[in-house]
Amino acid sequence: MSDSPFIYMKEHSKTVLWNDSADPKEIKDALTWGIVGATCNPVIALTALKADKEYWVTRIKEFAKANPQATDDQIGWAMVKELSSNAAKLFEPEFEKQNGRNGRLSIQTDPRNFRDAKLLASQAVEFSKIAKNMIVKIPVTSEAIAAFEEATYQGVSINATVSFSVAQTVAVAEAVERGLKRREAEGLDISQMGPVCTIMVGRVDDWVKVSAEKAGAVIDPGIMEWAGVAVFRNAHKVYEQRGYRTRLLSAAFRNHMHWSGILGGDSVISPPYSWQLKINKSGIIPNLNSVEEPIENRILEPMLEKLPEFRKMYDVDGLKAEEFTNFGATQRTLRGFLQSVNDLESFVRDVTVPNPDK
């Protein structure tokens, strides 16, 4: 086997690796072990800006000088777009090689628009034009389902995010199919479109643990580490059965099973750079058919019996579309993304209006 488990995976599996950050330094390193794309969100973008603070402070000053009417919020999003554009260039060769299926950089729409499908679709179209190999994230809220269909119809390759349940992944895939079929009916090209639907597997684990604590449920904590893997495997099974043209993507890592436990399908795995370094050094020999294996009853049954919130995420009809926005895992994640937008604006403000007391 190759020294890198990721290279071995790339050579012997349909599953591909993306980097969970648009940081160019991380991407250049991870390209050596086979990443073929990258994802980003407001939290990750701000982290990347801070990682190269000297450069981005200079760019903020330059942009503010050239655009004196721009608000700190507008400057912050301009920096996110520039960061994403720079990262997208690194994947252009892979994009051309794979005709758009991979080689993409994923940028996220403004999370403050999570209730407005028209605005999300419009921003998705705008962001898709930043680079030819851009893929655009939209959160899977109740209100946003229509945005997936419309953005797809407009030619945008979408990445559904803020997604934790099989029901959400099905709603996204069905919406994308409607958008693709509308394009096909009008003779519009879909050959380079590559939609994906993220399951934030680590946040599935997080919400199972939080909900178990709130409910006072007593369950083996090791079992709950399988929650995200179980949801992903069940969603994969449904996608395979129904022949959706959207691929699943695993993100929000908490343990190595969020890679090793879901290999073998035509899907994307997007670990943070720090996890890629750990896995490369781990010596793990991956099971390249793990996504097809059923979850053992000793693991699955206690969660289904004792944890209603897990059942909502695991069952194909566990959530109704009108329940997506107010689902606990959705609210927890949206709150984090919304706060990150405020933090991005504050980061810019410290440059444009520096604190005179410091």
Image (cartoon, helix red, strand yellow):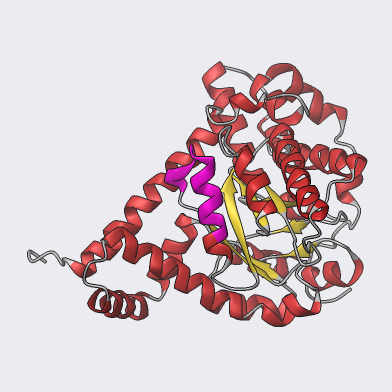
Viewport quadrant of the C terminus: bottom left
Where residue 235 appears, x then y in whole percent? 80, 39
Q: Is residue 352 left or right of residue 172?
A: left
- The front one of 50 and 301 is 50
Where residue 266 appears, x then y in whole percent? 85, 56
Asked whether residue 227 is in view, the answer is yes
Q: Is residue 141 left or right of residue 172?
A: left
Residue located farthest toward the front when viewing the structure as drawn: 186
Q: Residue at x 68, y 59 (%)?
A: 155
- The front one of 127 and 77 is 127
Asked whether residue 23 is in view, the answer is no
Q: Is residue 358 left or right of residue 151?
A: left
- The front one of 292 and 286 is 292
Viewport quadrant of the N terminus: bottom right
Where residue 290 appears, x then y in whole percent? 87, 50
Q: Say if the magenta span includes residue 120.
A: yes
Q: Residue at x 60, y 44 (%)?
A: 147
In the image, which residues are magenta? 111-125
Q: Residue at x 29, y 62 (%)?
A: 347
Q: Is residue 184 above or below residue 86?
A: above
Main SS of residues in magenta:
helix
Q: Residue at x 75, y 70 (%)?
A: 100
Residue located farthest toward the left when viewing the structure as drawn: 357
Q: Is residue 240 left or right of residue 170?
A: right
Question: Number of callouts in the render?
Answer: 0
Q: Say if the magenta span includes residue 337.
A: no
Determine which quarter of the picture holds residue 64.
bottom left
Where residue 241 appears, x then y in whole percent? 92, 40
Determine which quarter of the picture holds residue 283.
bottom right
